Image (cartoon, grey):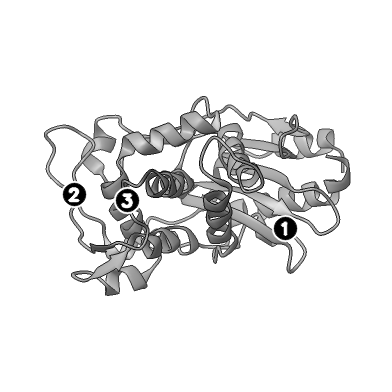
Amino acid sequence: MTWEDLDAHLARVPGTVSAYVGRLDAPAAWTRHADASHYAASTMKVGVLAALYRAAEAGTLELDAEVPVVNEFDSAQPGAPRFSCAPHYDNDDAVWDRLGGDVSLRWLAERMIVRSSNLATNLVIAHVGLEAVAQVWSLAGARHSVTGRGIEDFAARGAGITNAVTAADLAALLGALATGAATPGRLASPASCAAMLDVLLAQEHREDLAAGLPEGTRIAHKSGWVRGVRHGAGVVLPDDAPPYVIAVCTTTDLADGGSSGEDVEDDACLLIAHISAQVWAARHRL
């Protein structure tokens, strides 16, 4: 299948399907509506991860410092009451089991990525701050993405404060982590970038991008989903070709991601897996 064939196939999908594909530190091999804005869902957690590791490098936070596990957070909307997460809308009982206790920021960061825990995400944001996440997007070269609030901050959402991403910006962020792991990068030291990639490689939600790859293929990635939205972004590390970054964002009726937050294998997952498989087939000519 050529890129033109893939474009024609995606043109028949209702809604917006965006994509960015390319090798690291090289021009894109294929894009489709790569600058179109989508609600971020859980893909914003990669920016939060990077903000935490940058703070650790700067000495303002310690990854292994233990912090209280609470469920009350300041809203991004000035003057709004504090908000909480709903357990049924999360994907990780392990964090909720620690409510009232203490855990390390490093552990929270891992649960935020590998199980996409919303409670862990808001706890990390409470310590790093939204401004630090904004700086991550800027340093990665993102042009349109924003992390304006925590998860389930409904007062901020009602005031128009949102979290948005584009396929191009997600590719820039994941690519910055991957290239930074090999050479000093703008985001963090090679050691910190490599540590973040290790967390992303341990991702347990593998229903979209990873599902389109041969069994055992390494991919450092993060998904995001709510009803009507399904995204996948990551760095694929083939054994027989250079690494490449792939980001696919879908805002369509195909995404049944559910109001409960549960990750389900829906038609949007299958679509992203199909795109991932086509890119894998073309990996030698990206």
Which element type, helix, strand or loop, lies under badge 3? loop
Sequence order check: which comes first, mark 1 or mark 2?
A: 2
Residue 212 badge: 1
85 or 15: which is nearer to us? 85
> From the viewer's perspective, is residue 65 above or below residue 245?
below
Task: Examine the image and state in which quarter residue 25 appears.
Answer: top right
- What is the spatial separation of the Cα atoms under label 3 and label 1, in whole angstroms? 38 Å
On screen, residue 212 versus residue 61, left or right, reads right
Residue designated by label 2: 83
On screen, residue 144 versus residue 59, left or right, reads right
Q: Residues within 10 Å of mark 1 (few under 14, many from 20)?
A: many
Q: Amino acid at mark 2?
A: Phe
Circles 3 and 1 in contact, beta carbons < 8 Å: no
> From the viewer's perspective, is residue 172 above or below residue 261?
above
What residue is at 52 percent from the left and 51 percent from the top?
Answer: 192
Q: Amino acid at mark 1?
A: Gly
Residue 280 at x, y = what percent? 80, 51
Sequence order check: which comes first, mark 3 or mark 1?
A: 3
Residue 210 at x, y = what percent? 66, 59
Which element type, helix, strand or loop, lies under badge 2? loop
40 or 60: which is nearer to us? 60
Sequence order check: which comes first, mark 2 or mark 3?
A: 3
Residue 78 badge: none
- What is the spatial separation of the Cα atoms under label 1 and label 2, in whole angstroms? 38 Å
- What is the spatial separation of the Cα atoms under label 2 and label 3, in whole angstroms? 24 Å
